[in-house]
Amino acid sequence: MRRKLFYALFIVVFLIAAINFRVPTVSASTVSAAELISLVNSLRTGVYGLPALIEDPILDSTASSTAYQMAMNGGCAHLGGARERIAAAGFGGGATIFATENMACANSATIDSIRQWWADDLHMYPMVNASYTHIGAGTYTASSGVTYYVVHAAYVAGGGSYTSSSGGSSSAVATADLSNFVQPVVTSTPNGDGDIYHTVLYGQSLYAIATWYGVTVGKIKELNGMTSDTIYEGQKLLISIKPTPTITPTRTATIPQPTRTLTATKLPPTPMPTITVTSTVAPNIGSTLKKINRQYLGLGLLVISAIGFLFVLYKAFLKPITKK
């Protein structure tokens, strides 16, 4: 009996301990979108003496959707076309805008680690460039535990102004296109041979260089024997070569050779046959008799003679007898 009570007490104590036991929740350290914006503005105002960027709901939305899409893709890489996506979302009200995108991804991150990741010149554009006026940020944690952090900064080109839906406004200073994290590109003039070379500056991308020179990335890679888009500071790129003049054949008028006109040549008259007048000898009886067969001639004469004889006989003798 005591043993059963001991077992029952042990079970009760175990259940009470299990109920009161708290499993520590392990969660990755994440940084909020507000902390990302605060990081950018603290550097602009505290280090570089620039005005703070104005948070814009449109940029918050595009940054959040970009973070979500990166998580769905499962890759820690830019989606590309940040400026186009931001303009399509309505930032700038249809005016020409320039934009840049900072991103990072990690299972665990702090604001200091993100600050270190974005310490290079490319990612410092939103912090050091006075042209930018507005900012937005977004984060998204995927099922894998990786959190994607995105910051979008933008401004209106040409000195135009833009009033965000949050009420803030600012004027933008017209500068070169700095989208896609590139520095302004100063184009080079052709050398003596007519070829154009460009020396890469820090922060310039192959895409920006091709855009400013009006050529394609593929053309630059082809001219320089490149197999990737990677370039480095100080690299001398052949942008274009002097076009080889194409000789267009000139049509030369062909003078027609004179055609020989046939001239009728007067032929000598064909001699006509000469008519020789031959005197015709009048036929005589002798020549005619030569042509008559004498046998038939004799027979004919005999017949004629017989007929004459009968006629005479008839007249002389037979006719008077018949009358009597």
Image (cartoon, helix red, strand yellow):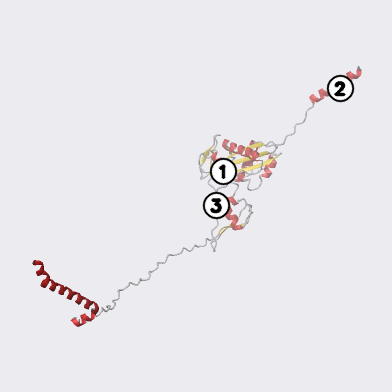
* Image point (57%, 37%), residue name: 58
Mark 2–mark 1 contact, CB under 8 Å? no
Give the side of residue 269 with respect to residue 224, left or right. left
Lower sequence index among marks 2 and 1: 2
Residue 10: image tag:
2
Q: How many marks?
A: 3
Left or right: 291 in relation to 42:
left
- Residue 25 x %, y %: 75, 31
Give the quadrant of the C terminus. Answer: bottom left
Residue 308 horizontal/vertical position (percent) = 15, 74
Type of the residue with mark 1: Arg
Mark toward the viewer: 3 or 2: 2
Three-letter amino acid code at disc 3? Trp
SS for callout 3:
helix
Residue in the image at 21% along x and 82% along y: 287
Q: Secondary structure at mark 2?
A: helix
Which image quadrant: the N terminus?
A: top right
Left or right: where 259 falls relative to 5: left
Q: Position of residue 35 (x, y in %)?
A: 65, 37
**Residue receiving disc 3:** 212
The mark found on residue 83 in the picture is 1
* Gap in angstroms between the C-alphas marked 3 and 1: 16 Å
How crowded is the residue under tag 2: few (<14 C-alpha within 10 Å), some, or many (20+)? few
Q: Secondary structure at mark 1?
A: helix
Quarter-wise, where is residue 18 in the image?
top right
Look at the picture and state if 13 lies above or below 153. Answer: above
Amino acid type assigned to the residue bearing label 2 in the image: Phe
Residue 69 at least partly seen: yes
Q: CA distance from mark 3 to mark 2?
A: 80 Å
